[in-house]
Image (spheres, grey):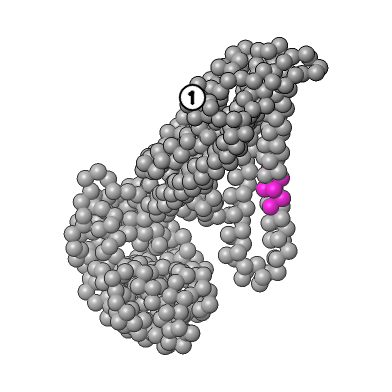
Amino acid sequence: MDQPRAGYLAIVLRVLGYLRPHRARLAGGVALMILGIGFELVKPWPLKIVLDHVLGGEHCANCGAEFEKHALPAFLQPLFGSVGPVTILSFAALAIVLIAILNGAATLWSNYITIDIGQRMVNDLRTGIYSHLQKLSLKFHHKQETGDLLFRVMSDTFSVQSMVMNGMLPIVCAAITLASMFSLMLGLDWTLALVTLFVCPPLYLAIARLSRRIHGHAAASREAESALYSRTERTIGAVKLIQAYGREAGVVADFRRGSEKSLALTLRLYSTETVYGWVVDSVLAAGTACLVWLGARHVMTGQLSIGDLTVFITYLHSMYKPIQEMSHNLAEVSAARAGLERVFEVLDREPDIHDKPGAKPLPKLRGEIDFDRVTFAYEEGQPVLRDVKLHVAAGEKVALVGRTGAGKSTLASLVTRFFDPQQGRVLLDGHDLRDVTLQSLRGQMTLMLQEPILFHMSVANNIGFGSPDASLDDIQQAARRAEAEEFILKLPDGYDTVLGEQGMTLSGGQRQRLALARALLRETPIVILDEPTSSLDLKTEAFVWRNVEQLLQGKTALIIAHRLSTARMADRIVVLEDGAIVEQGTHGELLARDGAYTRFWQRHSAGSVLEDEPVLAESE
């Protein structure tokens, strides 16, 4: 999925789009943050009052300066002008405690609100990318690593919270804090306040250079972690084969190399962030030392009071803290950008298969299917289907026969519109599939795959997955028709038994019977079966097919047949080779022609497997 990287502005604008639905709560959180900033600004003032109005009048033995007691500020005169120093001292001490409590409460509540908003944004983004993945075509999913997509959905989406709550919002609050403190510092000593600006240029250069490095390292670290996810997902899914072939040591070694690479890149990222913090701390320390020295000199010359210097130094420390935090926040934004780019890369992928403007719902189908000179290729220049022309009458059962790669599954996938042909048309009752809505199309089809797909849910929910409105009686009836109820009732909780991942606690035949029951439960005019009995013994297959034939009465069926015992039960057999139809007819008609199908039947009767045999060696 190589696409141009989005700039900061584009990323920020998209992130703000996810923040917009929560703007009311955000306003409340920001208001509490600003209230907390106000409490931070008044923190040193009780101490200033104590130093200047309670303890004033001290003499400096070293410099000879006399620190006089100052009058209370005008706004405090009505309250404390007539009280003694001890009372003022008591109220100042009480104010220190009260300010700390109120500041903590404002910070606590604002943090709760902003964290809640961040989690909601993650949920919105995560749901959005998951929903978008459901819309992307099988062609996209066939090319992507499942583990990589999983990492983007579950991990990279947290970057939206990091971008806003650990980056943008703290930067805005830090900017407000800095502006407020600098204004107050100007009022205390404008020359000293201006000196604080000298630290900004070197600080900016450090931030700009190291932020770029952090972004590059963060992107590389995420890619390596995503690749490790993919590798883990593949090997855990293939653990049976790995153990059977004794490849455990090799797989573990591969995993270790991937993990070490991921950890090395993560260490490089953390090291860069540590250097980043060290450089910023050093620049700020140099500025602090300079300002403390100059401020002390101003006190010695009487330009500042002891209380003013205390407030100034407190503000200085508090002022550099948001600058330092801003540098870390910018690093957080840079790292979050890498994750958001990976998320938006998926979201920006246009679905290959979608409803075109003006698409109309498909009316109730009779079930007539037409392939009108269809050519299809997964990769350009490598066609899988070549100029296929086929008519399937409503209610007809057609078996598709051919070895692996002949185009059987692809032909069926065009009917469900998992893909669109590059040339030609697929018609249902005369309607071009590209002119109707996907929901109305797939709602009139039943699909059963060769490899049963079962979910980590109850047996009943697995059977009813394609029919959410089905009752338990309907589900049980479908299970009986699929010859599945006997083993279901032997499970610990019967129909309520929760299956393991992919139903691995069941045998292959049991899994296939559950998938068949799911297909039997849907009442649709078109049914596509991908060898639904390939994992069943011959006796069970005969029972199941008797029930399937009852289900298919009056319905159109495409049956992808991998063994001829299945193909014989169809009204017509279509033989494909190298993406083209080379023969079609009933079982008896094809045997009478003594052609490709006859040779295939002879091999089948001798015990050969269709998928492994080049059965159509000669052109018909």
Residue 163 higher or lower than 128, as above or below: above
Residues 165 and 546: in front is 165
Residue 257 higher or lower than 559, as above or below: above
Residues 553 and 381: in front is 553
| Magenta stretch holds residue 217 | no
The magenta stretch is 259-265
The image shows residue 269 at horizontal and vertical percentages of: 67, 40
Identify which residue is drawn at 59% across, 17% down.
188
Decide whether the magenta segment is chiefly helix, strand or loop: helix
Identify which residue is drawn at 32% across, 52% down.
374
| Magenta stretch holds residue 261 | yes
Side of 41 relative to 475 (left or right): right
Amino acid found under the numbered disc labelled 1: Phe
Whether residue 212 is visible here, answered yes or no, is no
Residue sitting farthest toward the right: 62
Q: Quadrant of residue 559?
A: bottom left
Residues 481 and 564: in front is 481
Identify which residue is drawn at 57% across, 17% down.
186
Name the residue carrying label 1: 75
The image shows residue 193 at horizontal and vertical percentages of: 61, 17
Identify which residue is drawn at 68% across, 32% down.
276
The image shows residue 218 at horizontal and vertical percentages of: 61, 40
Give neighbour class at mark 1: few <14, some 14-19, many 20+ (Cα, 10 Å): few
Residue 552 higher or lower than 308, as above or below: below
Q: Where does the C terminus fall, quadrant-wise? A: bottom left
- Count up the numbered dots: 1
The image shows residue 321 at horizontal and vertical percentages of: 62, 31
Whether residue 358 is visible here, answered yes or no, is yes
Element under label 1?
helix
